[in-house]
Image (spheres, rainbow, N blue to C red):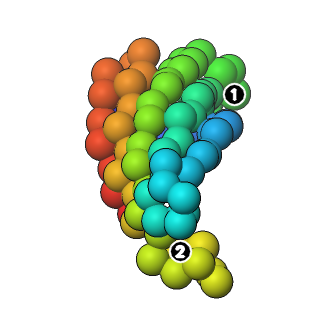
Amino acid sequence: MVGEANRIHISVESEYRFTLSRDGLWGFEVFLNGVLTADPATGVFSIVDPGVGAGIRIKFDKETSANLSIDYGWGAVIPMGCSWA
């Protein structure tokens, strides 16, 4: 987005994770999030972007709980997206 670097953002996310396999290798999550964006000139928060999504998790290390995750989400301002980490 043009001018995105000049804006102030506040993000909030909540997620619920659960396991799909007994050994904990596979997991799933659903999440809700929201982003408020303000114009720095006025300080007014004028854009609200709520979103929802789901993702799958593959556990690599049980001791550290390291996961590979693939998430897909839908938002009001940014319609959809996919991420992995």
Q: Is 81 drawn above or below residue 36 in the view shown? A: below
Q: Is 84 drawn above or below residue 53 in the view shown? A: below
For the C terminus, the quadrant is bottom left
Dividing the picture into quadrants, the one containing residue 50 is top right
Left/right placement of residue 81 relative to residue 34 reads left
Can residue 60 be seen in this snapshot? Answer: yes
Q: Residue furthest front?
A: 22
* Amino acid on which the number 2 mark rests in the picture: Ala
Q: Secondary structure at mark 1?
A: loop
Q: Secondary structure at mark 2?
A: strand
Cα gap from disc 1 to disc 2, whole angstroms: 39 Å
- Please give the label number shown on residue 43: 1
Left/right placement of residue 46 relative to residue 27 reads right
Dividing the picture into quadrants, the one containing residue 65 is bottom right
Instruction: From the viewer's side, name the closer residue of 85 and 21.
Output: 21
If you read the primary sequence from the N terminus, does the residue marked by circle 1 or circle 2 appear first? 1
- Please give the label number shown on residue 78: none
Q: Is 69 drawn above or below residue 8 in the view shown? A: below
Instruction: From the viewer's side, name the closer residue of 1 and 83.
Output: 83
Q: Residue at x 32, y 22 (%)?
A: 79
Which class describes the residues within 10 Å of circle 1: few (<14), some (14-19), or many (20+)?
few
Mark 1 or 2: in front is 2
- Pointer 2 residue: 66
Q: Is 27 drawn above or below residue 80 in the view shown? A: below
* Amino acid on which the number 1 mark rests in the picture: Gly
Q: Residue at x 56, y 34 (%)?
A: 31
Instruction: From the viewer's side, name the closer residue of 22 and 30.
Output: 22
